[in-house]
Image: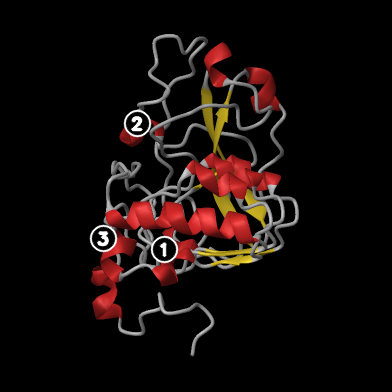
Amino acid sequence: MNRWGDTSDPAPERRGFRQDACACFDQSRPHPLARVGFHTERQDTSAPGWLRLLELIDQAAADGREEFRPLVELSPEERRQIVTLPPSIARLTMVKHLVLYGSNLVRIPPEIGAMTSLEEFTPYTSYRLHWFPYELTRCQKLSRSTVSTRALFGNYKLRPPFPRLQPDLDSVTELALEDLDPGRWGTTAIHRCSVCDHPIEQAGLQQMWISLRVATDVLPLLVNACSSACVAALPSGAQDYIHTPHKGGRADQPRSNRD
């Protein structure tokens, strides 16, 4: 028995059965000048794994369970088909522990912020998951996390850079907010401001990076803000990380005794 359920594979050489390869940056050696980008994969919403995940979320929302381990209900092939989570995770308001051990995820939707009972978050060994939505900070009960920090943009161990974000937009009328290029924007859709929760379509769009301590770990968070005022309302970055919101790229990161 292991604490993560049967998604844990003790043989590293078998990892490919459930995860695609990731070459965004070397997760074992520092490469401070490397250029990185977002994963470009889009979720296949017709895949059996995705359809089964939707069913599992419906079941969890209906029975009000406090722990949700969806991947243990999927075959290795089905797990590999999941590159994000559906917006319906917003219905999991009773879940206290979300386990995504060994996932093939490349992004998590902002709807995770609606999981207001969340106390523990475990996406450990999800090596293609390099960042999180700022909306995760809305889970105010979240106090424990287990994250593979070497896989994160800007982590203090390897200091990889962040993807460079798009220029600020005063208006999004020309932007297809429901069909975005994930390689440019990090996601396929942006609906609401990460800070004030107002609809983005009624304002502009300013994307920013900020590294904050969330539960046990310092996480790189992607902010989709509707205005300069919302950017100004963001807190200061974590100790040993860039203190202000930034656009990514080769941003100078503070050095510490741990480096």
Q: CA distance from mark 3 to mark 1?
A: 10 Å
Q: Secondary structure at mark 3?
A: loop
Farthest residue, direction right: 141
* Classed neighbour count for the residue bearing mark 2: other residues with Cα under 10 Å, few (<14), some (14–19), many (≥20): some
Counting every numbered tag in the picture gives 3
Determine which of the numbered discs, if any, sits on residue 60 in the image: none
Residue that badge 1 annotates:
126
Position of 209 relative to 206 (above/below): below
Position of 222 relative to 54 (above/below): above
- Name the residue located 62 percent from the left edge and 61 percent from the top edge: 63
Q: CA distance from mark 2 to mark 3?
A: 21 Å
- On screen, residue 56 versus residue 50, left or right, reads right
| Nearer the camera: disc 2 or disc 1 | 1
* Classed neighbour count for the residue bearing mark 1: other residues with Cα under 10 Å, few (<14), some (14–19), many (≥20): many
Label 2 vs 3, first from the N-terminus: 3
- Name the residue located 64 percent from the left edge and 49 percent from the top edge: 212
Residue that badge 2 annotates:
184
Quarter location, residue 48: bottom left
Residue 57 location in percent, x, y?
Answer: 51, 55
The amino acid marked with disc number 1 is Ser
- Name the residue located 52 percent from the left edge and 20 percent from the top edge: 205
Q: Nearer the viewer, residue 239 or 42?
A: 42
Residue that badge 3 annotates:
20
* Classed neighbour count for the residue bearing mark 3: other residues with Cα under 10 Å, few (<14), some (14–19), many (≥20): some
- The answer to whether residue 159 is visible is no
- The answer to whether residue 99 is visible is yes
Q: How is the image coloured?
A: secondary structure
Residue 206 location in percent, x, y?
Answer: 53, 23
Label 2 vs 1, first from the N-terminus: 1
Label 3 vs 1, first from the N-terminus: 3
